[in-house]
Image (cartoon, helix red, strand yellow):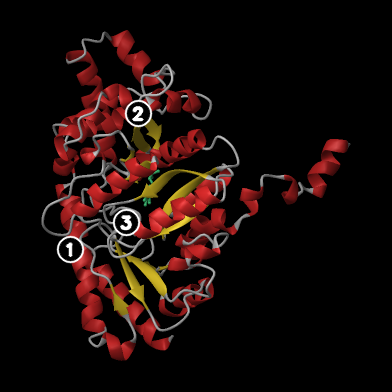
């Protein structure tokens, strides 16, 4: 039969969208596979949140809190509560008002809840935004590089070229940004937006100083581009106070703010959002057009998941700062432990050739080492030293040699403090130091 022979022959990969054959899209799985092959390896690679406080009972409680909120605060009857939680629902989401309140309480972002689109993780918000920004072959995305692989991968799926912009010590090199915009325009292209993580970026850990945030907003207005601000780590400063997000400073509606509850509630809830208050078309907001696209992708975000996230918000007066006090402490201690632990194990960086940055928050530290950091070296580290970390080349787009990936293997890697408890971090650092010495 024809169908059987087709199945036996297999499908022709080259007949499918080219992105699925691109190593970039295998990047996250590659790291998971290495972890799977070496279950006894301690992971300084995973950027997954700390699990020590997770409890399934919290999910049940949050669901009850949200259902009670619908009954008592919103005045819903039982039938409407059931329908809200169990039926198809509003494409823009059902916890948009709670998220808007959280943004106001924690971030000083005051936005019309109608400009908030609740999505299936931040990744969907990112994907939909890029979808709308790519009108035709002339459109390009700028991304501060090294960049979170999720943005480069999503752009690849959408045939949207990504032009790297240097990060520099301040989170974005504004001269390079101006230059890249000029070059793209001179080539007849339309740079639409800059993707940036101003707070404790993934992978660099860098935080953008406040004056640079103002300058970046000014430049975005002068050059007529949008800023896609991704903010999963902003609530986890290592010490001192948090800085205002770009969105909190955005008086000209240049910023589409992308949020994730993966690190503040838990990743399994798969809730993220976009704040897109730009007026456009019959609108009123860009969020409405994103919702139109979403209705053809995921239809609406799971209301059960939204209810769990909503319940968690309600339990803490809509403050994720309050909801994550214990987690913040763990991450603060974890970062200290990594930075101080490296200093104890490599007391003389000029002699060892091993140096690292000291981020002001988030999960990540970047380490420079005196050898090429390839995936094969990681495999050896996992096999012989039972410790995992992330080669930094995964955050550069090999298809864009000017991103820094074309000049030969990189000599840096990322360590994450988030997944392990204190004793395991110390043990992992011992193993990491032994691996570096052997390499
Ligand atoms: C910078 C950045 N953005 C977005 C995400 C993913 O967010 P979500 O799990 O909500 O899709 C991550 C996860 O690691 C991240 O590091």
Q: Toward which corner of the image does residue 310 lie, by quadrant?
A: top left
Q: Where, quadrant-wise, is the N terminus in this rendering?
A: top right
Q: CA distance from mark 1 to mark 2?
A: 39 Å
Q: Quadrant of the C terminus?
A: bottom left
**Which residue: 44% across, 18% down?**
88
Whether label 3 lies within 8 Å of ligand 1 gets the answer: yes
Q: Answer whether residue 150 is visible to the viewer in this image.
A: no
Mark 1 or 3, closer to the camera: 3
Q: Is residue 134 left or right of residue 341?
A: right
Q: Which residue is mark 1?
A: 333
What crowding class fits label 1: few (fewer than 14 Cα within 10 Å), some (14-19), or many (20 or more)? some
**Mark 3, mark 2: which one is toward the viewer?**
2
Quarter-of-image position of residue 270: top left
Image point (36%, 76%), residue name:
368
Local secondary structure at mark 3: loop
- Residue 278 numbered tag: 2
Q: Is residue 234 above or below residue 112?
A: below
Which mark, residue 201? 3
Front-lying residue, 74 or 209: 209
Does residue 393 appear anywhere in the picture?
A: yes
**Which callout, 1 or 2, points to the residue nearer the camera?**
2
Residue at 40 percent across and 28 percent down: it is 302
Which corner quadrant of the image does residue 387 belong to? bottom left
CA separation, marks 3 and 2?
A: 25 Å
């Amino acid at each position: 039969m024809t169908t059987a022979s087709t199945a036996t022959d297999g499908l022709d990969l080259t007949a499918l969208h080219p992105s699925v054959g691109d190593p970039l899209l295998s990047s996250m799985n590659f790291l998971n596979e290495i972890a799977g092959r070496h279950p006894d390896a301690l992971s300084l690679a995973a950027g997954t949140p700390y699990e020590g406080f997770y409890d399934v009972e919290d999910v049940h409680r949050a669901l009850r809190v949200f259902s009670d909120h619908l009954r008592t605060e919103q005045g819903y009857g039982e039938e409407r509560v059931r329908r809200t939680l169990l039926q198809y629902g509003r494409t823009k989401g059902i916890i948009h008002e709670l998220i808007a309140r959280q943004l106001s309480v924690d971030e000083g972002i005051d936005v019309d809840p109608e400009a908030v689109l609740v999505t299936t993780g931040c990744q969907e918000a990112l994907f939909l935004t890029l979808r709308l920004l790519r009108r035709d072959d002339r459109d390009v995305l700028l991304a501060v590089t090294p960049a979170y692989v999720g943005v480069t991968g999503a752009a690849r799926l959408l045939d949207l070229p990504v032009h790297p912009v240097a990060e520099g010590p301040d989170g974005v090199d504004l001269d390079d940004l101006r230059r890249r915009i000029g070059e793209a325009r001179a080539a007849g292209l339309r740079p639409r937006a800059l993707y940036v993580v101003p707070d404790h970026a993934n992978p660099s850990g860098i935080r953008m100083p406040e004056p640079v945030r103002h300058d970046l907003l000014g430049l975005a207005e002068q050059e007529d581009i949008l800023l896609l601000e991704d903010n999963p780590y902003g609530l986890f400063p290592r010490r001192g106070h948090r800085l205002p997000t770009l969105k909190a400073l955005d008086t000209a509606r240049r910023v589409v703010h992308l949020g994730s509850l993966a690190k503040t509630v838990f990743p399994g809830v798969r809730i993220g959002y976009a704040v897109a208050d730009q007026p456009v078309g019959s609108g009123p907001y860009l969020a409405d057009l994103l919702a139109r696209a979403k209705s053809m992708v995921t239809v609406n975000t799971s209301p059960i998941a939204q209810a769990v996230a909503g319940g968690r918000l309600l339990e803490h007066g809509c403050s994720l700062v309050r909801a994550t006090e214990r987690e913040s402490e763990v991450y603060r201690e974890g970062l200290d432990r990594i930075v101080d632990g490296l200093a104890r194990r490599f007391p003389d960086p000029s002699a060892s050739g091993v140096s690292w940055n000291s981020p002001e928050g988030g999960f990540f530290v970047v380490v420079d080492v005196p050898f090429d950091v390839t995936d094969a070296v990681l495999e050896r580290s996992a096999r012989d030293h039972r410790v995992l970390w992330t080669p930094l080349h995964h955050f550069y787009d090999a298809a864009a040699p000017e991103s820094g990936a074309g000049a030969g293997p990189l000599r840096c890697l990322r360590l994450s403090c988030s997944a392990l408890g204190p004793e395991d971090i110390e043990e992992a650092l011992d193993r990491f130091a032994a691996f570096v010495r052997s390499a």
